[in-house]
Amino acid sequence: MHIEPFFVEQWMNAHETTATWNIAETCVHSLTLDELLQMSGDADGVLRRLRDTWLGYGDITGSPRLRAAIAELYGERITADHVLTANGAIGANFLALYALVEPGTTVVSVQPTYQQLFSVPESLGAEVRPLRLRAEDGYLPDPEELRALTDERTRLIVLNNPNNPTGALIDEPLLREIVEIARERGAWLFCDEVYRRLEHEPGTTAPSVADLYEKGVSSGSMSKSYSLAGLRTGWVAGPQEVIRRCLDVRDYTTISAGVLDDALAAEALEHVDAVLTRSLAIVRGNLALVDAWIAGEPRLHYVRPRAGTIALVRYDHDVSSVDFCQGLFDFNGAFVMPGAAFGEEHSFRMGYACARDVLDGGLAAVSAYLRTLEA
Ligand SMILES: Cc1ncc(COP(=O)(O)O)c(C=O)c1O
């Protein structure tokens, strides 16, 4: 079996611990344990329960408490029995793809997106057909193009909403059109929804595909919107048939997720309004800074993200994205992701949900580097 090296993760691993200005990060600035305890409103009670926690494997599929809290993020179709926890969304995506992809079938996946979503199906022997997302369309999929890419061998359509790396958001009417195409083909519709609920305009939260479609499967995690990547807790939500298939795979890879992570994730989701209020204040406030910065940099352009923590920024310089980003890192330690990680040359992906001082320093550092390219 061959699997493509995972560009984004390798670039992150190589630079994130030594960067001076890490504006490549995709998580909302992570909480400390103490901040989470404060948000719970009952720090002493939570700590007491953690001290009493039995450190066995715990509930194999995730605790009923956590699965119920996750189910609350969805509509009526999804109950605790339609949820399976995993090691981050990266674990959840792997389980779902392993469960849904059949060799010799075709999978249609949006691109650009998180590479795992198409490299894993390829490694499993599927023919992956890219559904291109273009700047001129606001990085939204064209349903007619999707229809043309599907055929009788199509078993799976893969979306990522809100999108990494562009921050584009597929609204409900377009999602429903996509559901109809999947339904006509009898295909599963899998959507990585880790940036869901980080929509910048109030009231624009897109529905989950797990709520819209009887063959819709969603993945999510505590890492991005809920600023708790260190809990390494993600999930698959969808029809029980898929959850059962994922469990068959998970027995080989996970056994169970950590019981302390499980308890803290449940605590956070039981106070989800407080967690999201903080996250939304960070992403909305910081995006305003990025907007003003882009407006003042004539050789940078972007499609303003509508959701999430990241933006794909294009530059007018004749230098490859890897050289641009490595040159920037070497010049002053500012760290962004080359567009090459997404097949999008002459661009970089930046994260803007970091601490305010890091964002200010990072933007100034990119500006200083741009001056050297202009000289
Ligand atoms: C779209 C997307 N899916 C999944 C992941 C994996 O996140 P985690 O495993 O921390 O939940 C990431 C991380 O960057 C991501 O951007």
Image (tube, grey):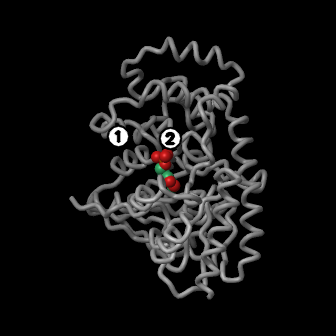
- The relative height of residue 176 versus residue 299 in the rendered view (above or below) is above
Q: Quadrant of the N terminus?
A: bottom left
Earlier-in-chain disc, 2 versus 1 = 2
Q: Position of residue 133 (x, y in %)?
A: 55, 72
Q: Position of residue 43 (x, y in %)?
A: 66, 20
Q: Which mark is residue 94?
A: none
Does the rendering let one see residue 191? no
**Residue that appears at 65% across and 55% down:** 358
Q: Quadrant of the C terminus?
A: bottom right
> What residue type is disc 1 on?
Arg
Location of residue 286 (image quadrant): bottom right
Q: Which mark is residue 245?
A: 1
SS at badge 1: helix
**Residue that appears at 30% across and 34% down:** 251
Near-viewer residue (164 or 229): 229
Q: Position of residue 209 (x, y in %)?
A: 56, 50
For label 1, the crowd category at 10 Å Cα-Cα, with few meaning under 14, some 14 to 19 and many 20 or more, is some
> What residue type is disc 2 on?
Ala
The residue under label 2 is 237
